[in-house]
Amino acid sequence: MDEQLTWKDATAQAGLVRCGEMSPLELVDAAIERIGRCDPALNAVIHRQFSTARTQAAGELPDGPFRGVPILLKDLGAPQAGEPYCEGTSFAKAAGYRAERDSFLVQRFKKAGFVVLGRTNTPELGTAITTEPLAFGPTRNPWSTEHSSGGSSGGSAAAVASGMVAVAHGNDGGGSIRIPASCCSLFGLKPSRGRVSKGPVGGDSWNGFSVDHVLVRTVRDSAAVLDQIAGYRPGDTFAAPRPARPFSQEVGANPGRLRVALLDDTVQAGFRADPECSQAVRLAGRLLESLGHEVEIAHPASLAEPEFQRHFLVVVATAVAVALTEWSQLLGRQVSAEEYEPANSLLAALGRSTTAPEYLESVLWLEGFRRRTIAFWSEQGFDLLCTPVLAQSPARLGELSDPVNGAVKESETLQFTAQFNVSGQPAASLPLHWTPGGLPIGVQLVADYGREDVLIRVSSQLEEASGWADRRPAVRA
């Protein structure tokens, strides 16, 4: 039963509780044991609240669809009252800072019946695509501990991929759900802009580019959790269109014959995709064709616009500068530049030197980019775009965090994800390919704005056809 339980998804675990086969406390104790056994090799869970979790599991839990199922929260974007909250920073860790209240997202996780076991590792302020914060050390990839688990939800991805838990929170402002899902062979869906509330403290994070969800092993878990956490809350800046029916009802539903655009290489001048990443997309295209879909080579012309990176960087850098100001206010003292990592020091400097007109110029340019990108779906009649998640295979630890060459390596790697944070469209990483050396390579599917239903239907179809759930990493619980 132990081995079987390790690889049961959250939906199946909830079923064990409902039928009385296991209690919430037994589920929680089993997950605690797996974390204790597996995490020393990976460094995914940086804060453990096991005693509180056991007390909650033994008591009266909300009668939600995931009653008793263990979950881990990323240490970014999901503050929980009374628990440590650091966003990967050394200064918050040193101060012993604890969140004052639950975010709306945490409230909804709890209402769904989840039991929070702790918090997962994240790069400082979530600004890197590898999880190697100086404050907590690197998270290692369960498939190869010499490699990065991705970022910024790398701790959550490593925890789910290794079997510690079936579901862990993540968020995505430039690829931070999809990238670790790709690196760790998981299903990672970034919902539409405004689908999940950032309140009550958070607003339109990174100008609305960032959105929360989870990393999981099965499509049905992703859909069922989204049903629980989605929805407008008063005061939200953005609100995604309401779905026609629950997302969980899209799992296994016939997607019909879809028209899929295929992009298997970078389109920004001066960059090329790793052949394995291109091959992953081509094989995915053949699989889609075998399932009856129409596949053709095409992509939005906007993806080749060289100005994108500059304007996106302005928004992110300004957000970093503001975040550091907010941390100074929370801690009641000025956080100095010596207390955060060099990459964020550079971003903060850029953000502080950006004038208000310059910032608004970038926001307006990116609004135009959003319209030009989304028009590809409506004007050319495509249902999906299929691309690599990353332009390079999973990096070795230290490559992306290198203070001299890391920024160049990150630019080479980050070619396909941030554009759809700006456009606000739902996009998912599917674990459909592995290198000859056994490293996972994710394939990205992007749907029209508000059309998570289309993504869930076809992802469910591809999950069944590929059998991705049968693979296990080298480091596992």
Image (tube, helix red, strand yellow):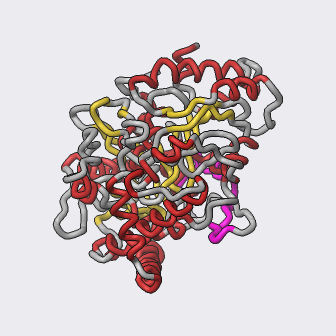
- Residue at the far left: name it: 270
Counting the numbered discs, the total is: 0
Which residue is at a point 24% across and 47% down the rendered structure image?
402
**In front here: 254 or 5?**
5
Q: Is residue 124 visible?
A: yes
What kind of secondary structure does the magenta stretch mostly adopt? loop
- Residue at the far front: name it: 333
**In front here: 66 or 359?**
359
The spot of residue 11 in percent (x, y) is 64, 34
Which residue is at a point 70% across and 53% down the rendered structure image?
104
Identify whether 125 is placed above or below 34. below
The spot of residue 269 in percent (x, y) is 19, 70
Which residue is at a point 59% across and 34% down the rendered structure image?
118
The spot of residue 51 in percent (x, y) is 68, 24
When asked about the image quadrant of residue 185, the answer is top left
Q: Is residue 361 left or right of residue 85?
A: left
Q: In this view, does 189 lie to the left or right of 395?
A: right
Which residues, given as a range, are shown in magenta?
Answer: 236-255
When asked about the image quadrant of residue 373, the answer is bottom left
Q: Is residue 228 visible?
A: no
The spot of residue 424 in percent (x, y) is 50, 67
Q: In this view, does 348 lie to the left or right of 103?
A: left
Residue 467 part of the magenta segment: no
Which residue is at a point 48% across and 47% down the rendered structure image?
91
Quadrant location of the N terminus in the rendered image = top right
Identify whether 158 is placed above or below 461. above
**In front here: 165 or 127?**
127
- Residue at the far right: name it: 60
